Image (spheres, grey):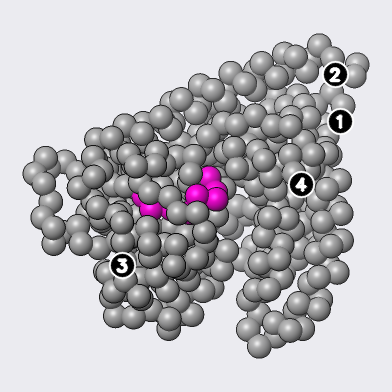
Amino acid sequence: MRLAFVYDRINKFGGAERVLLALHQIWPQAPLYTAVYDQQRASWAKVFQVIPSFIQKIPRAKKHHEIFPWLTPFAFESFDLSNFDVVISLTSAEAKGIITQPRTMHLCYCLTPTRYLWSGFDHYLANPCFGFLNPLAKLVMKPVLKKMRSWDKVAAQRPDFYLAISKTVQKRIKKYYQRQSEVIYPFVDLGKFKLPVSKKKKSKKEKNYFLTVSRLVSYKRVDIVVKAFNQLKLPLKIIGDGTEKKKLQRMAKENIQFLDKHLTDKQLISYYQNCAALVFAGEEDLGLVSLEAQACGRPVIAFRGGGMAETVKEGETGLLFDQQTSQALIKTVSSFKAGNFSQQVCYQNAQKFTREKFIKKFKSLVEDKWKKYQNWKPR
């Protein structure tokens, strides 16, 4: 079975990139096609044969791909994938738009339907992040995004099969693309995120802060967390970086600390292990930070409306709040008692999402789909 991977862009490292490395473990010979490849910011991809699109040759495109949203669809449509039996696209944007021949099976592992075109359309339009140019940006963006929506809807019909990273994403695929999908949850790295070595109980002083780990961009709704803790006056540490950081820093009172974005893994894990709870107000596709916190033995306080509700066992490994407002979060944090949550129970819940289980299930599913596809594909 000749197989290839397709991914939106290779210029960072996060949950999706960990998934790609796990898939590489299953199919190490598979090349990786992408719109742009920034080798400096994505050294993890050196294990792949990376094939970037023509956008790679455009000055500044590697670091500022967002400048060329209208070109990216053409980039993925330009790839010749005729030599492969199976193509797996991993995407939250345009990679699903590849064009394959009838004899090639295209399986899309969908991180979410393109957020700024669908579930986050109104939020992105209201917060284009162009500063004083926002009014002009809004006028230009609306017709452009509507045209991109049309392409995205067409492109969404091209995969033969869909996999979703969560039930939340599965519902979005059905709602926006009218496609059925199966759920395969991503994994948490239990070799890295783990319980503290010491069995000695931490003092109250060591666990007197709450923690937020997130990209600091508007749709993550870290602003809700900041507003809530401004009123609660409880210690909050925020780990992350993004376009909203300066704005959030201006909002925050003295009880809120923004930590260095260049933390080592050891430092990050220590912050997880020693917090009272992870706090998150965004509507996540899945929310791997929830699993990372639980793997470190810590409970989670999260918005019920997204994927985190699928990984948190309410009352056992965390608390969920129903409205995406600072007042709802204040009420939930005020009712939180760290002593009600066992680090062993949190860790055991995270163990349901292991790399080994993911690899076994994904490999089996792809092989099964390919066998069935061979029986009915056009000859």
* Outermost residue to the bottom: 132
Residue 274 located left or right of residue 222: left
- Within-10-Å neighbours for mark 4: few <14, some 14–19, many 20+: some
Task: Give the percent coordinates (x, y) of residue 103.
Answer: 84, 23
Secondary element under disc 3, as helix, strand or loop, is strand
User: Which one is nearer the viewer's eye here, 170 or 18?
Assistant: 170
In the image, residue 356 above or below residue 19 = above
Which residue, given by chain and number where applicable, does mark 3 sit on?
A: 236
* Quadrant occupied by the C terminus: top right
Per the image, the residue denoted by label 2 is 377
- In the orientation shown, which residue stands out farthest toward the top? 375
What is the span of residues highlighted in magenta in the rendered image? Answer: 300-307
Q: Earlier in the sequence, mark 4 or mark 3?
A: 4
Tell me which corner region of the image, top left, top right, bottom left or bottom right, holds residue 297: top left
In front of the other: 369 or 7: 369
At 38% from the left edge and 62% from the top edge, which residue is drawn?
A: 331
Q: Is residue 254 above or below residue 210?
A: below
Residue ID at (53%, 45%):
307
**Structural distance between the alpha carbons of marks 2 and 1:** 10 Å
Say which quarter of the image contains residue 232. Answer: bottom left
Residue drawn at (57%, 57%) of the image:
11
Q: Earlier in the sequence, mark 2 or mark 1?
A: 1
Q: Which mark is residue 176?
A: 4
